[in-house]
Amino acid sequence: MESMLNKLKSTVTKVTADVTSAVMGNPVTREFDVGRHIASGGNGLAWKIFNGTKKSTKQEVAVFVFDKKLIDKYQKFEKDQIIDSLKRGVQQLTRLRHPRLLTVQHPLEESRDCLAFCTEPVFASLANVLGNLENLPSTVSTDMKDYKLYDVETKYGLLQVSEGLSFLHSSVKMVHGNITPENIILNKNGAWKIMGFDFCVSSTNPSEQEPKFPCKEWDPNLPSLCLPNPEYLAPEYILSVSCETASDMYSLGTVIYAVFNKGKPIFEVNKQDIYKSFSRQLDQLSRLGSSSLTSIPEEVREHVKLLLNVTPTVRPDADQMTKIPFFDDVGAVTLQYFDTLFQRDNLQKSQFFKGLPKVLSKLPKRVIVQRILPCLTSEFVNPDMVPFVLPNVLLIAEECTKEEYVKLILPELGPVFKQQEPIQASNMILLIFLQKMDLLLTKTPPDEIKNSVLPMVYRALEAPSIQIQELCLNIIPTFANLIDYPSMKNALIPRIKNACLQTSSLAVRVNSLVCLGKILEYLDKWFVLDDILPFLQQIPSKEPAVLMGILGIYKCTFTHKKLGITKEQLAGKVLPHLIPLSIENNLNLNQFNSFISVIKEMLSRLESEHKTKLEQLHIMQEQQKSLDLGNASEESKVANIGNQQIDKVFNNIGADLLTGGESENKDDTLQNKHKKVSLTLEEKQKLAKEQEQAQKLKSQQPLKPQVHTPVAPVKQTKDLTDTLMDNMSSLTSLSVGTPKLPASSSFTSVPSSGLGMLFSTPIDNTKRNLTNGLNANMGFQTSGFGMPVNPNQNFFSHSSTAGATKMAAGPPAAFTGLADLSVPLAAGVKQTQQRPTDMSALNNLFGPQKPKVSMNQLSQQKPNQWLNQFAPPQVSPGMGSAVMGTQMNMVGQPAFGMQGNPFFNPQNFAQPPTTMTNSSSGSNDLKDLFG
């Protein structure tokens, strides 16, 4: 490992030293930075070629350096001859300007150690490409080793050389004199360029006459660098000391032969006896047959044979060679057209760019990247041409690696992403980019996606063109997985929603919904529930396609494993929105069935989840109750019994309100179904205490309002039944005609606040004249009752129903024979009424509790007197006349004058059965009501 590192270190040090020594002190280094040694070229490959950059503009260049150490072996006059020859060639190249000639960026500079000049970026010389690595570093680059010329490159390269010679022969009237692979340079883009004008010969005749080119006799004593390469030199140079444009065409023929023969020339020349070699060569050329040219393609074989003809006049000229069928290859013509692109107008360019994709598929990748791509990207400066160029650039990008795309294509696309003028071209650019969005997002770095690509997508969603919006919405799902979540949530989704709500196009609205449905899987659950689903309720249109889009989003969210809809959302928002949509008149049968199928599925899951929850809660409550019962005290048991009784009160009131308005026949039917239920021990004990307290109250002296001194109760035990029977003497005027009390009637204390919340208008019962079993004129204040007077109600029949229970027919078991004791009063005799006694001080003892009164006792009063006991002494002007004018019907039912008032309708408050009567028939009736 250490030896490898040392070897690498020595190589780098040697290369750096070579570069430093080669250009040390040369003026070229003032303006250019010299880089790595990449190639060699020129006569005898004497020029080292380095890559470099211009310091001021960072423009890439090639630096040609001739190290004078190469000629240290020569005498001084020979050195001067070599230097003069090299200078002449570079100076002549600098004066000439043509696309087929190597372009000089900086003229020749000489220093003590070297000669140097700068040209356009260069890859290598043709000799290097063909395998001649003379004057190259020991470590040749991989690109150089693996470089292989494709047929299209060879054809177009030879065509370029022919065009360069045509320029020299026709326009400049010059013979190059040394056309060899060393003097043909391949630039960075792969174009073949001519250099090495060291031995060029210009015409001595005026331009209007036949050109005449003087020729020097071959001097074998001169250094090799002062002589052209004899292997590519025409025979007339040596044998007849003459040259003409046809001599360059012979050299072109030998170059063609060498290209197809791995760099080997057709003849090898002995430089020590050059005349003998050329004489033998001339004889071979005169007998040259097709068998000697088998390595050359058949379509150009005959033309090469003509180029190698001994007679110069038989050889084709440069212009004729450019027109041979061999160069009519589609790839070569395409490359040639690119080189003349600047001469074409926009119409010609547009037609060419439209047909280019068909040609690109037939060309090698390196040719496309090196030769075609730079020409295409140069057209981005013309806004009108961008829509025609861009598809080809993106087509090339598909074949490039990510590194090549980032290095060669992405920098050129930056301005195109932001182009908005002209409008028509901008819209076409958006469409093209949207169609290739997957490519852009795959190969573009994340930062550039966020800064360049996504803003273009946002602009497309807001574009005025419906076609662009539709296309954008259609392709967004294809690359949604490549968009980072914050950009999707904060920028993309809001624009899709705006496009859906603000557009006037049905297609855009439907595509917006479809797009949202396809990208739901890339969003999180709570964003969908809080942002996407509420948005669906804002969509104004009711077209079937829109409704099915809405249904699709709901269904995707509902069924997706990652998302899902909570049962609260289902019950509160989703189903209330979906159910009305399902009955829209525009939906057909299949669409309606789709809605109903989803709704049923949602209801089924809602039922299942909530039932499971309730079952779990029920189990927990039962477990808690069992624990509480085991640890609770006697007071807790009594409190639980009281709570159960309150629940029964509310349940009976709810049943009463639901069954209110039924006929009396139905009430009687329900009453007849109740059966006697035995009391618990606690209830019996409490009933006995209440009876004892009632007895104490009866024996207590009346209290004055001003005196609040409590009177100690006298403990006296007296049977309640006997007391009630003693007070029946005032009720014998009426016959027994009212319904009888159920046998299970009893007193139970109920808090007043429970029922007070149900009714809004309290009634002061202390101002009523009531006749009851305890005292004919005793009044009790019921502050908790806010219920209007209803003659059908018995406020004292059972404490658990507190004025809202319905009486059951039949006398109680405790009052058997009570009906037999009643005697009708004589007609016309008025029943006297005693002055009511103020019993307000007893409120602290009783609260809302009311003594029970028998219906038989009330039924023995006169009808009007019975009604007046329930009527308030003061009636509001609006309803007083109706209440005061109430009459009793034939069965004791009051007939009100305000039949249209629902509040005073006695049927609105049907009397529920007594809570203590819990027969099986009564339970069945409640089950029928509440399911």
Image (tube, helix red, strand yellow):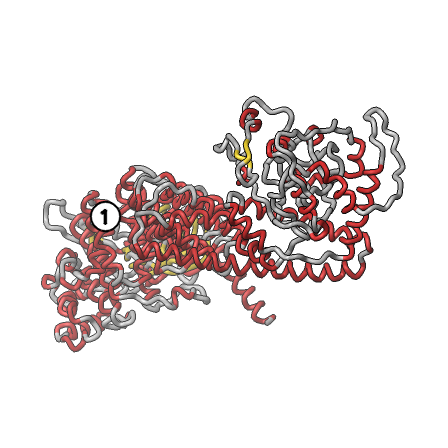
* Quadrant (top left, top right, bottom left, bottom right) of the N terminus: bottom right
- Camera-side residue: 770 or 754? 770
Write down the quadrant of residue 57 in the picture.
top left
- Camera-side residue: 527 or 115? 527
Q: With respect to residue 366, does 730 lie above or below?
A: above
Helix, strand or loop status at disc 1: helix
- Camera-side residue: 730 or 857? 730
Write the residue at 39% across / 64% down. Answer: 143
Q: What number of labels is visible? A: 1
Q: Is residue 447 visible?
A: yes
Write the residue at 52% across / 58% down. Answer: 607
Where residue 190 sits: x, y (%)?
Answer: 31, 58
Write the residue at 61% across / 70% down. Answer: 2
Where residue 582 sits: x, y (%)?
Answer: 37, 50
Q: Residues within 10 Å of mark 1 (few under 14, many from 20)?
A: some
Where residue 440 sits: x, y (%)?
Answer: 39, 53
Write the residue at 75% across / 43% down. Answer: 724
Left or right, 382 with reference to 745: left
Q: With respect to residue 322, does 269 lie above or below?
A: below
Q: Amino acid at mark 1?
A: Leu
Query: Which residue is identified by label 1?
Result: 341
